[in-house]
Amino acid sequence: MISGWSVVPFAELLAELDRLVGGTRPAVLGVNGHSSSGKTSLARRLGAALPGADVLHTDDLAWHQGVFAWDALLVEKVLPVVRSGAPLDYRPPQWVARGRTDSIRLRPSLQWLVVEGVGASQASVRGELDAVLWVETEEMTRLGRDVVRVEENREMSVADFHSWMAEENAYVVAERPWEHADLVVYGGLTVEHDRDTEVVLGVVVPP
């Protein structure tokens, strides 16, 4: 349960992550949250600040695969390569079947892999993660961002958006993923902080 928010230097978040994962390398972080909560922005910051880090977006694995049906691809195709220290150059099955010609690439000898997306810590992959972050953002902010993504940027059709949200909401209700997070990070607009040097962490009260 979150009792409030604490503005801290971003370096403090990095130190806490280092403490959570201990000496495990590569360390695999899951950055989960609702759509438009700020997951991608946080993952980008982590990827730039953590030494030897790269970011994997679950949207890439989920492309025509299913909102949450990418889990086996992560566990069976991506993580073994990352943990071996080899570079990843991977085209998921739907990319091949639909003629998408690029690929998901991750650098070799990773020290940190940030897995970012809705369901990044779903139950079927949680055991593969060394730490989990949940990004919490007020609903009105998320909905406002969704309008921009769907109606202005045309990232997906309205029908596809509603189908996605139906699956997302069902997942959130069923798994309550914030309860399995090691850290809760605020991704909204109402808590004042320096977005370049600080981060807002949830103050968690044990149940």
Image: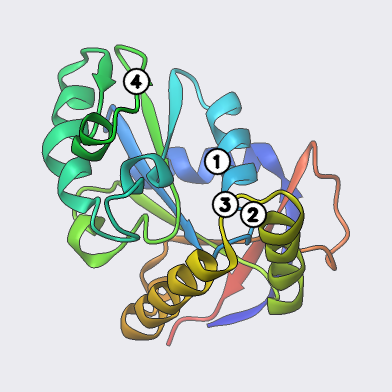
Mark found first going from the N terminus, 4 or 2: 2
Give the residue pinned by disc 4. Answer: 101
Look at 35% across and 76% down and name the residue there: 171
Question: Image check: 45 left or right of 24?
Answer: right
**Circle 2 — which element?**
loop
Calculate the distance from the C-alpha at mark 1 to the C-alpha at mark 2. Answer: 9 Å
Vertical position of residue 186 compared to residue 113: above or below: below
Measuring from the top left, give residue 3's x and y in whole percent. Answer: 64, 82
Question: Image check: 150 left or right of 91?
Answer: right
Give the residue pinned by disc 1. Answer: 43
Under mark 1, the amino acid is Ala
- Mark 3–mark 2 contact, CB under 8 Å? yes
Give the residue pinned by disc 3. Answer: 39
Under mark 2, the amino acid is Gly
- Mark 3–mark 1 contact, CB under 8 Å? yes
Query: How many neighbours does mark 1 have within 10 angstroms: few (below 14), some (14-19), or many (20 or more)?
Result: many
Q: Nearer the viewer, mark 3 or mark 4?
A: 4
Calculate the distance from the C-alpha at mark 1 to the C-alpha at mark 4. Answer: 25 Å
Under mark 4, the amino acid is Thr
- Asked whether 196 or 123 is in front, the reply is 123
- Asked whether 174 or 144 is in front, the reply is 144
- Asked whether 165 or 77 is in front, the reply is 165
